Every structure is written in structure tokens, then in C-alpha cells.
Image: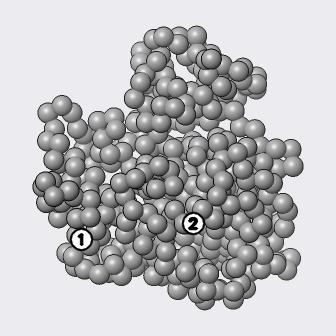
Amino acid sequence: MNKASSTCCAVCLVTDRLSMGMLGAYGNTWVDTPCFDTLAFQSCVFDQAILASPTLHGFYDSAWLGGQAGNSDSHNQPLPELLAEAGLETILVTDEADVVAHPVAETFGQIVVVDSAHESPHNGAIENTCLGRFFATASAQISDIEVPTVIWLHTRGMAAPWDAPLEMRGRYAAEEDPEPPTWREVPHGEINSQSDPDELLGVMQAYAGQVALWDTCLGVLSDAISDNPILHKALFSVMSSRGFPLGEHGRIGSGLQGDDEDELYSELLNVPWLCRIPGQATAVRCRSLLQPVDLYALLKRWSGGKSVGALGPEFDLTSEGHAQEFILTQAKSGEWALRTPAWLLRSDATGEVHKELYLKPDDRWEVNNVADCCREVVEQLVHIYDEAIHGNQVSPLNEVLLYGIT
């Protein structure tokens, strides 16, 4: 085993169901997220982190195995083993049973499971909420680190009961609004023209309260990192493993059927990710297309004491540069989405009946379907999909697919 330097330490926080559109650093002006926004000012913020799989298992196939989502048979070395060979201790802290069940989880040197089955008081203190309990455990683990360590923190986040103090929901209710709801069950369903707008407003207020709670807890975690001298030069990554639809395309959460894999829109797939690395530029934004697999590559280089390259407008992950031209996302239902820097193409399971095309990054939440007036673009993207799905080499994309129609 190599002797690791304390400069190779890392803290990786993954929060499930945290939506990019609710964070100030990503343009939200409605919900207060001062802790996340402060951290963003100290970091590089990735604008185009796209999931290749809408499932937790797929996320960790990429982030822990460095392979294609859904491929647990990747020939890459599991990340915890790679880190251990670099002389680093590895700790996994989670409140999610599915994360513990992933085959790579058992390769961590230590696993701390936080009980998430408790029921907090109806309007209790922050420390009694699901998020409060998780972050308290995570902060305690961070405070106890005395040797070079990579600690991976995964919380159910907004997939856990929405038990933020009701006062936090009340912050987002105007004087003329109905009282925010008091339920704590994670909402799932569909909305249409017949839906009561006050019900959707209540869901938005409740979700905003959860995000505010998460942000407060993030501040506690950040303080714990700052208070531990061995982590002063640690890499700090904050990422979401999935977003949470809030009615953008007629669905709340995972819909009525409890499965949102066939709704491959940006509210689910485009997740927040920032990375604070000592010595890197701060308060910068990256426009490159990225996936969870890039976190695997980043930590591999970081733990090996190698330069991670510039984290800036064009993410330079390796000495050869990082040039990812498209990301393919597939659902078990057969639906798929193909994203390039300039376009998002969605297709139904048949691949023949229904396709939607959106201009990126301008049409952030896929409002204006331009498939009918850009049929040549659709055809080109379908061809790329066909080549990629059959394992063929995809030729470099042309300027229209990279930069749009000018």
C-alpha cells in the first residue's frame, strides 16, 4: 500500500432527488440556498451534468466503476479499491439501502448506515429530521478523520420523508396563498388542466422547505470539513443522483406508477454538480457535457496525486483534454434520450412513433419541441443513436449538432 498525502483527501456528497432548478447558483431566485451558493463561489459549477441512467444502480455503476450505466460488469477497478491502493482510508455513510446493496459498497473500508426509518415529530427540530440525522452522523464521521481518507456520503435527500419544520415551508407562501400542506409523504402523481393549482403550489412549497433544510445541513457539513485540519486541502464534490419532477411535463416525482424512467427530461437527468479543489480557479462555470463517470475519473487522478486538469469552461480532465460530444440515456422501458451540446432528442420505446427535439442549452426545461421544423437534425441524431447502441464508432459530430443552427 502506498502512503497517501493528506492533500489527496476527498469528501463526496451525493443527494438523491435534489433538483438543479431549486438552487440559487443555478439561477433560482425563489428558494434561499446560501450555503450551497457560498460553496459554489468557492468551486467550479458544472452546468451540464447529465445522467446516463435515471436509476441509483446505474448512477453508481458509473461513479464507482467508471463504466457505462447499468453495467456492473465493468472491467475498471472499483473506486474504493483504487483509493485504498493509493493509501487512502475509505468510508461510506448512507441512509439508502439500495446504495448499500450495490456490489461495490462492500469494498469500502468502513460502512456507516444511518437509520432512516424513524418518524420525526410533526414540527420538530432540524436535528430530528431525516436529513438532520444523516448530516449529523456524516459531520461526526468527518470530525473523527485523522488519516488521509476519502469519505463518500449518500443521502436519500428528497426521496426521504419531507419532514422539514413547517416554518421552512411557510417561508415560501405568500400572504394570499393557502396554508402550506402538513403532509410528509413524498408526493408522486400527475397533473393536467383539471388539476388544482393550489395542490401543485403546496408541493412546490413543501419541496422548497426540504431544499432549505438540506442547505442548512450542508452548512453544518461544510463547517465540519473546515474544522478538521487534515481536510483543509481536500477535494469536496457535491452532486445529485437524480432530480425531482415538479410538474414541468405533467408529472410529480415518479408519477402515479412510481417509476419515472420513461420521463427522460432535464428535471430528472440534468443534475447539480460542483467541485471545490484547492489550487483550482474558483467561481467558474463549466459548460462541458459530463456524467457521473467523470467523478470516477476525477477521483482516480486526484488520489494518484496527478493534476486533474483545468476545471473551467471546457473541462480538461486528462492531459489529452476532455471532449465529450454526446450522452445517451436509456430507460428500461426502451425510451431513450440523446444529448449533445446543442440538442436533446427524446424517443419513445418503439423509436418510430414519437420524437421530441429541444434546442440546448437555451430551452432548459424542454418547453418548445422543434422536431417538426428540424427533421434533418432528428435524422442525424437518430443515426448517432443507432451507431452507439450497436457499439459502432461514432464519427465526430458536425457543427450543427455541436453548436446548433445559426
Locate residue 43, reporting x and y percent: 64, 61
**Residue under the point 42% across and 15% down:** 353
Decide which of 60, 14 is in the foreground and name it: 14
Q: Is residue 69 left or right of residue 350?
A: right
Label 1 to label 2: alpha-carbon separation: 25 Å
Mark 2: few/some/many CA within 10 Å (<14, 14-19, 20+): many
Of residues 380 and 224, the one drawn nearer to the viewer in this rendering: 224
The residue to which callout 1 is attached is 167
Secondary element at image label 1: helix
Q: Which mark is residue 39?
A: 2
Which residue sits at x=16%, y=58%?
175
Residue 225 location, quadrant: bottom right
Q: Is any atom of residue 75 visible in this view?
A: no
Checking the image for residue 139, the label placed there is none
Q: Amino acid at mark 1?
A: Glu
Amino acid type shown at disc 2: Leu
- The image quadrant of residue 133 is bottom left
Residue nearest the viewer, comparing 3 with 318: 318
Q: Position of residue 335 (x, y in %)?
A: 46, 30
